[in-house]
Amino acid sequence: MSEIRALSSLREALWNEYRRVRSETEALASPITAEDAQIQSMDDVSPAKWHLGHMSWFFETFILRNDPAYQSPREEFKVLFNSYYNAVGEQHPRPRRGMLGRPLLEEVLDYRHEVDAGILARLENLPDDEIGKIDAVIRVGLHHEQQHQELMMMDILHVYWTNPLRPAYHGADPPKGAGTAPLEWHAYPEGVHRIGFGGDGFAFDNEYPCHREFIHAFELGSRLVTAGEYMEFMSDGGYERPELWLSDGWSTVQREGWRHPLYWERRQGTWWRMTLYGMQPVDPNTPVCHVSYYEADAFAHWTGWRLPTEAEWELAASDLAVEGNLLESGDLVPMDVSGEAFSSAPSQMYGDVWEWTGSAYLPYPGYHASPGALGEYNGKFMCNQMVLRGGSFVTPETHIRPSYRNFFYPDSRWQFSGIRLAKDI
């Protein structure tokens, strides 16, 4: 990307952030071959090539096309890379994204660079009194791109797993941990607390409005549930005991034949799992990953405890620094917590794996979707999904915060999702 020229500090800061996030995307995509970037391994997975095109489609659609004088260099991409924005126009069917042999990957990358040039030109030429408007939309686009960075990594792992060769995204050996701290409990008294985003900076509309909630006294586990602990659940017949499961969860287990987390398989008496480093032995000290809400809830019932609500999770995380095994660490796998658990606060609240909560994804009191087509971003999905909190090992540090609400259907397992326990006092 070319450098921005002689512009205000706000424009320069915005361009530098834009350039940083866009470059991170291409760095994450660089190990993915053109052949692998084409594959759609299930309906929920999008090809990496589609992700790369859609991220640029977002900026072109919501910024560049607002200029009546703008001429798109790829008008045919308007439908191909629209995800679900009905107010914008037609979309290519999601289950058929893997059938798009054209455009070629290099054409999609060229499109990215064309959109970048258009954004730079817009920043250079926009009047000073309109910079605030474009700033807000660009920041939505950058956080949207960071979401798709993680989605692209989730999806390419599923693509590689469906290949019997089990190829690795990263060719080096994965980092090794040193053990797991014992599970302890951190107590929080009852009270009325402010939940939702109420500070400066960026947040999605589903994090608003900041509101008050009464939270009963509870305790939160000091760390994430480990793969070894989950193996105990499996060995105790966890997948064969209907009394542990929600009705829909038990039906799903029977229909899908689940007996272990996604990507696990048994080899000569040892559990292995598919990772971004290829197939690796399951480290019992690391957080269990790739479990659905149904599995997380069943495990919690097996222990006699429960999953935290999203308000409880946010209360516990609100005073903690946003740090942990996030994308910037470069580990690309969930890591253990060696040594003693932190005495003052729970560990692993950010990074490693997204943490299922016991809360349905619903609007906060007084919620209003953003105006226009961007209002379709979050609000229309507030039905039949559950909230996850905290980020994973491929979530960028600049993208996550205490109020961030992720959401998936309760039977979804291909995301980097895990478990933290809570209990009543």
Image (cartoon, grey):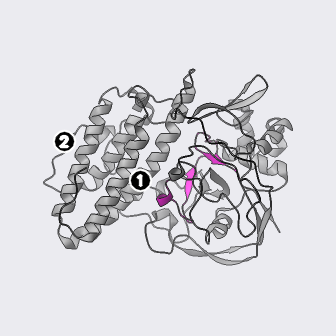
**Residue found at the far bottom of this picture:** 192
Point 40% across, 59% down: residue: 375
Point 68% across, 62% down: residue: 309
Pick the residue in front: 87 or 81.
Answer: 81
Q: Which residues are magenta?
A: 396-419
Q: Which mark is residue 144?
A: 1
Q: Is residue 383 at least partly visible in the picture? A: no
Pick the residue in front: 330 or 116.
Answer: 330
Q: Residue 130 appears at what percent x and percent y?
A: 22, 69
Point 16% across, 51% down: residue: 70
Asked if residue 377 is positioned above or below residue 9 in the image, the reply reads above
Classify residue 215 by image quadrant.
bottom right
Magenta residue check for 398: yes
Asked if residue 146 is positioned above or below residue 132 in the image, the reply reads above
Crowd band around label 2 with a 10 angstrom C-alpha radius: few (<14), some (14–19), many (20+): few
- Separation (CA) of disc 2 from disc 1: 22 Å
Asked if residue 196 is positioned above or below residue 412 in the image, the reply reads below
Q: Secondary structure at mark 1?
A: helix
Magenta residue check for 194: no
Crowd band around label 1 with a 10 angstrom C-alpha radius: few (<14), some (14–19), many (20+): some
**Three-letter amino acid code at the position of disc 2:** Pro
Q: Residue 390 appears at what percent x and percent y?
A: 60, 58
Q: Is residue 269 at least partly visible in the picture? A: yes
Classify residue 256 by image quadrant.
top right
**Three-letter amino acid code at the position of disc 1:** His
Q: Count up the numbered dots.
A: 2
Residue placed under numbered mark 2 in the picture: 73
Question: Would residue 354 appear left or right of 239 to someone viewing this image?
Answer: left
Point 24% across, 37% down: residue: 76
Question: Would residue 145 appear left or right of 72 to someone viewing this image?
Answer: right
